[in-house]
Image (spheres, rainbow, N blue to C red):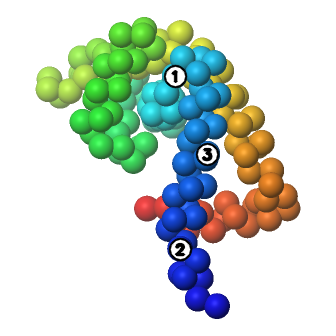
Amino acid sequence: MDIYNEELGYIMWRVTNNWQKLMKLKLQEVDLTHVQFALLRSCHSLNERGGSPGATQIQIAQDSFMDPMMASEVLRTLEKKGYVNRVPHPQDTRAKLIRLTESGANVMERANQIVLEADKTFFSKLGPELEGFIKQLRLLMP
């Protein structure tokens, strides 16, 4: 059987859409879109890994595999919500460092728990095959 005759891309698209619908629904509890959550998570992760006082917009966009212009727009929204702030970069006068505020860290932690629980529910159908599924998905990551 030729698995590509099963419309592999279409199946992947449908599964991804269903997962994104669940994320959208669950993240409404904390008034975040999934993209907003991804950028908050990335900002937090970069700061934790690097021990730095902030990450640049480009670093955050790259870390989350997002278009820099889209990331810029969403980060502006997060700044208006009080979840991030921008401070001058100490070496690059053109850049700003983006830091999570205390409320940003709090909402990111809450959202992270929501996402983990939603993922657990969504992927529970895979049962013991989940670990292998994750390994296979990682092969497709850039």
Q: Residue at x 35, y 24 (%)?
A: 75
Q: Amino acid at mark 3?
A: Trp
Tell me the CA gap for discs 2 and 3: 19 Å
User: Is residue 22 among the parts visible in the rendering?
Assistant: yes
Task: Say whether disc 3 or disc 1 marks the residue closer to the N-terminus.
Answer: 3
> How many residues crowd around disc 1 within 10 Å: few (fewer than 14), some, or many (20 or more)?
many
> How many residues crowd around disc 2 within 10 Å: few (fewer than 14), some, or many (20 or more)?
few
Q: Secondary structure at mark 3?
A: helix
Q: Residue at x 49, y 27 (%)?
A: 33
Q: Which residue is mark 2?
A: 7
Nearer-the-camera pick, 50 or 39: 39
Q: Is residue 109 left or right of residue 59?
A: right
Q: Residue at x 53, y 81 (%)?
A: 4
Q: Is residue 137 left or right of residue 84?
A: right
Task: Say whether disc 2 or disc 3 marks the residue closer to the N-terminus.
Answer: 2
Q: Which residue is mark 3?
A: 19
Where in the figure is residue 135, as x and y percent of width and height? Answer: 66, 65
Establish if 86 lies above or below 20.
above
Tell me the CA gap for discs 2 and 1: 33 Å
Q: Secondary structure at mark 2?
A: loop
Q: Secondary structure at mark 1?
A: loop
Where in the figure is residue 102, as x and y percent of width and height? Answer: 53, 10
